[in-house]
Image (cartoon, rainbow, N blue to C red):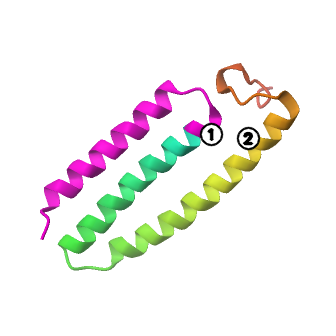
């Protein structure tokens, strides 16, 4: 059996990679992928603690989180594609279309 600390370390590494990518990249699609990494690290924590406590609630919450992440990714990708069709770029720093 793999110890709980290894799951937590893996989750912290994946979350750190996602956070670093979110703070450094300017491309909208890469930013969405980094948010997905951060959500997946939270899912790793949920499943690890669920397995550690012999309780299924963490795994159920992980399934709901995966469904929510899929919906977020689909809507975010659709917004980015509509912005790309209007502006021919997805550079988040140069976009001001959603401002007043």
Whether 83 is drawn above or below 55: the answer is above
The residue positioned farthest toward the top in the image shown: 94
Residue 18 is labelled as none
**Dividing the picture into quarters, in which one does residue 49 lie?**
bottom left
Residue 29 is labelled as 1
Could you tell me which residue is drawn at 12 percent across and 62 percent down?
3
Whether 40 is drawn above or below 65: the answer is above
Q: Position of residue 27 (x, y in %)?
A: 62, 30
Residue 49 lies within the magenta run: no
| Quadrant assignment for the N terminus | bottom left
Q: Is residue 94 left or right of residue 73?
A: right
Q: Is residue 36 left or right of residue 93?
A: left
Could you tell me which residue is drawn at 82 percent across and 42 percent down?
82
Whether 52 is drawn above or below 43: the answer is below
Marks 1 and 2 sit apart, C-alpha to C-alpha, by 8 Å
Q: Position of residue 10 (x, y in %)?
A: 26, 50
Question: Are discs 1 and 2 less than 8 Å apart at CB?
Answer: yes
Q: Where does label 2 land, which residue?
A: 80
| Numbered disc 1: secondary structure | helix
Whether 97 is drawn above or below 39: the answer is above
Q: Is residue 5 left or right of residue 35?
A: left
| Magenta residues, dominant SS class | helix
| Quadrant assignment for the C terminus | top right
Q: Residues within 10 Å of mark 1 (few under 14, many from 20)?
A: some
Residue 24 lies within the magenta run: yes
Q: Residues within 10 Å of mark 2 (few under 14, many from 20)?
A: many
Could you tell me which residue is drawn at 37 percent across and 55 percent down?
42
Depth check: 99 or 74 in front? 74
**Dividing the picture into quarters, in which one does residue 71 lie?**
bottom right
Q: Earlier in the sequence, mark 1 or mark 2?
A: 1
For the record, the magenta segment spans 1-30
């Amino acid at each position: 059996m793999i110890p709980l600390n290894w799951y937590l370390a893996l989750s912290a590494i994946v979350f750190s990679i996602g956070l670093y990518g979110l703070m450094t990249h300017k491309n909208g699609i890469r930013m969405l992928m980094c948010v997905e990494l951060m959500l997946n690290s939270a899912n790793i924590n949920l499943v690890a603690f669920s397995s550690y406590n012999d309780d299924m609630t963490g795994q159920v919450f992980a399934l709901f989180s995966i469904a929510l992440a899929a919906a977020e990714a689909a809507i975010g990708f659709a917004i980015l594609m509509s912005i790309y069709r209007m502006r021919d770029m997805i550079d988040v720093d140069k976009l001001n279309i959603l401002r007043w």
